[in-house]
Image: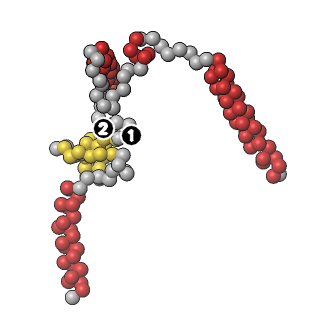
Amino acid sequence: MINKAFALLVTGLSLIAPAWAEDGTPDTDDGRYTFSKVAEGFLRLDSRTGEVSLCRGHAVGWACQMLPEDRAVLENEIARLRSENAALKKDLLARGLPLPPGTMPEPPAAQDGHRAPWPDNTSVDRVVKFVGRLWHRLVDGIARAQRQPLNKG
């Protein structure tokens, strides 16, 4: 009786398992990856790096192959959109119209083409002192690490 029930359970699971495997998507690694089903398999988007891969099932398992991208085309489009966006903001402000909510005006360096001024000497002095303290701490730590094995012996 128990063997018959077990056999029915195993048979039922073996019939259902292929349907689950075919409809399910791969693990998303805590939200890092998003998957979209396509005819060839799944497109995987890495939300940390922006890389897109095509994942396909093979006889020995799944494999993902990164799709080529033309980064120069993307960078040119980003630059074009930024300049167009800056021009639109400038036009809105020139007409006395407010910018849409959540939109910041262009920083002065981007509006008039001038670079930001160099930091004053006090800021530079503070940075130099900080780097000096950091360097001394690093050197002291290395010296302590080198002396440590000698003290144990």
Badge 2, how many Cα within 10 Å: few under 14, some, many 20+?
many
Residue at 21% x, 82% y: name it: 5
- Residue 87 shows up from this direction: no
Q: Give the number of the mark in front: 2 or 1.
A: 1
Q: Amino acid at mark 1?
A: Arg
Tell me residue 111's x, y (percent).
38, 14
Q: Furthest-front residue in view?
A: 96
- Label 1 sits on a secondary structure element that is loop
User: 14 or 26: nearer the eye?
Assistant: 26
Location of residue 13 with respect to 135 vertically, above or below:
below
Instruction: Identify the colour scheme used.
Output: secondary structure
> What's the amino acid at mark 2?
Val
Q: Which residue is mark 2?
A: 52
Residue beneath the point at 34% across and 41% down: 46
Q: How far apart are labels 2 and 1 at the CA level?
A: 11 Å
SS at mark 2? strand
Q: Is residue 13 above or below residue 146?
A: below
Horizontal side of 142 relative to 67 (left or right) equals right
Circle 1 residue: 48
Q: Is residue 143 above or below residue 125?
A: below
In the image, 46: left or right of 5?
right
Q: Is residue 103 left or right of residue 36?
A: right
Whether residue 98 is visible here, answered yes or no, is: yes
Looking at the image, which is closer to me, 45 or 59?
45
Q: Quadrant of residue 145?
A: top right
Residue 107 in which image quadrant: top left
Q: Tell whether 10 sits left or right of 145.
A: left
Q: Position of residue 30 (x, y in %)?
A: 37, 51
